[in-house]
Amino acid sequence: YQPEAYIPTTDTYIEKEAQINQLIDKLRLQSTTNIITRKDTIVVASVSCIYNIGSPIDYGKYSVNIRLNEDFDPKKLAVALVKILYEKSEFEFKRGTFRIRGSSFDIYPAYEDYGIRLQSEKGQIKKIIKFDPLSGKELGAVSSIDKIVTLYPAKLYLTDKEIFTKAEVQIRRDLKAEYADLKNAGKIVEAERLLRKINYDLELIKEVGYVNGIENYSRYFDGRSPGDAPHSLLDYFKTAYGRNFLVFIDESHMTVPQIRGMYNGDFSRKKTLVDFGFRLKAAFDNRPLKFAEFYRIPSSLIYVSATPDEWEVEQAKTEIKLSFLKKSVKSPHPGVVEQLIRPTGIIDPKIEIRPASSEVADLVVEIEKRVKKGQKILVTTLTKKMAEDLTEYVKEKKIRAQYLHSDILTLERSDILENLRKNAYDVLIGVNLLREGLDLPEVYLVAILDADKEGFLRSRTSLIQTMGRAARNIQGEVIIYADVITRSIKAAIEEIERRRKQQIEYNRLHHIKPTNIIKPIREKIIEHEEDYLIFDKVTKDVTEEILQTINTQAM
């Protein structure tokens, strides 16, 4: 996904570009559809769930009901489906399309894995059949009991002519005012650019009901006032369940700051677009929720983190009991539930401190010992350059190693982690990505280099998170390389020792023998697709397009 942006210093306009993975798109639409139609929905989302995705009321309103034995007019149904942004496609039957074949009318819902075939006879629907879109095999018919099939929109943003007519009046009024403001400010080029851009978008919406970037006009279509909060995924829950839903924020020490910062980052990018005539000011209202807006929506919220920040801790309100200790805990932070006990009984790893002055030589010895036993090792450094250099050094010692840091593309990172588990190499060396969220039962040793260099990467929180990567294996160990015992090191070790003490006591009381976690290597949702081109057979136009794409990605 490449958001729309403008770089004034180089006069470069980057158009919004979304290469949509069909499976992910299906899951998004499946989520919104299930929320408004069911009472048992769980959605796993990233922080992007606080972005504007259009009104849940409108999404539910624009639906098409199909009933057994009702009068059937293929043309009327086709028009109704086009209104909810389905496309007619006789050749490529994919999600969000429909086709007509004789007395059969096939629809591929945008949020399902199956197609729906309507079979008519004498102007009535006699059969509604689910079928496999690839093989054509029938999967079963809709019974007379469940004789209604409801189809929901193929996209999250949509509008009808009546709403568009009202919105267009307001859009053109704002366009006139902002056009005048730009001209009065001496921005003639920007004013004309804005006029062309908005007129083009309006004409396209009028003709086909959609345009790339339609979300920037969502305030007009939703009937919101300037500054009103956008409709996010959370609003779908609120519309469907009222206040009766629960939100978990995983890795809250990282996620909460992300939620806080997303509005400002989005506003900064949009301000440039508005100032230079690419968007109306209404684009500011196509945004993520502000933190206060987000926090007002869920009535029940649970923060999940191995190292919560003070802010989350302060939100807790109730006292807890640790039943296995047979006593009430007068916690300085009532309401914080410490889940120190792992289902497999694994305790936090033993920690050893060694001198940083000889860390590389000592580390290589430790790696070699474990590689002989078929064990995997994680090493964390302070910089990307150090990770790359150490990887090369270790490889020279005939050890299979790979580095992992933020310069590596997101999809490639998951490949690297998977390859470690598949025994493609033995050592993974990284910077900040070897912290939370990694469950690698094959890892026996976590080594932290330059642990005494105080800072974000060697704070108490970061050290505890990194050490936790060794707590997926009963033989997991941590080696900290430091010449000075900093406050962060001391605090991190004390916390780990406190947890170990409780875990060992719990295992003793309940006769639990720790075992390694068992984690299968799952099939990935997204696979890589490589395009190979023979450049001497590529036209000039295609070559220029490729170069333009490369330049855009470089920025």
Image: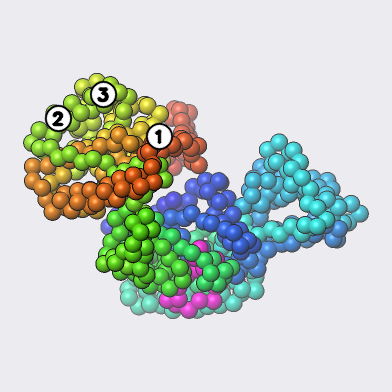
How far apart are the two marked residues, 1 and 3, measured between alpha carbons?
Answer: 18 Å
Residue at the outermost right position: 122
Q: Nearer the viewer, residue 125 or 186?
A: 125
Residue 229 seen in this snapshot:
yes
Could you tell which of marks 1 and 2 lies nearer the N-terminus?
Answer: 2
Q: Decide if residue 112 is on the left or right side of residue 372.
A: right
Left or right of 242, for residue 61 = right
Q: Earlier in the sequence, mark 1 or mark 3?
A: 3
* Secondary structure beneath label 3: loop
Residue 224 is a magenta residue: yes
Left/right of residue 555 with respect to residue 522 in the rendered view:
left
Instruction: Tell me, for residue 418, which label it has, or none.
Output: 1
Which region is colored magenta?
221-236
> Which amino acid, mark 1?
Glu
Per the image, label 2 sits on a secondary structure element best described as helix
Q: Nearer the viewer, residue 37 or 267?
A: 37
**Residue position for label 2:** 362
Give the amino acid at mark 2: Asp
Nearer the observer: mark 3 or 2; the answer is 2
The number of callouts visible is 3
Residue 73 coordinates in the image, percent (x, y): 82, 58
Residue carrying label 3: 399
Secondary element at tag 1: helix
Is residue 259 something one can see in this rendering?
no
Write the residue at 43% across / 65% down. 301
Q: Earlier in the sequence, mark 3 or mark 2?
A: 2
Name the main secondary structure of what is drawn in magenta: loop
Q: Position of residue 39 (x, y in %)?
A: 61, 62
Q: Residue at x 26, y 23 (%)?
A: 399
Residue 428: x %, y % from top left: 29, 34
The quadrant holding residue 190 is bottom left
Q: Residue at x 71, y 36 (%)?
A: 135
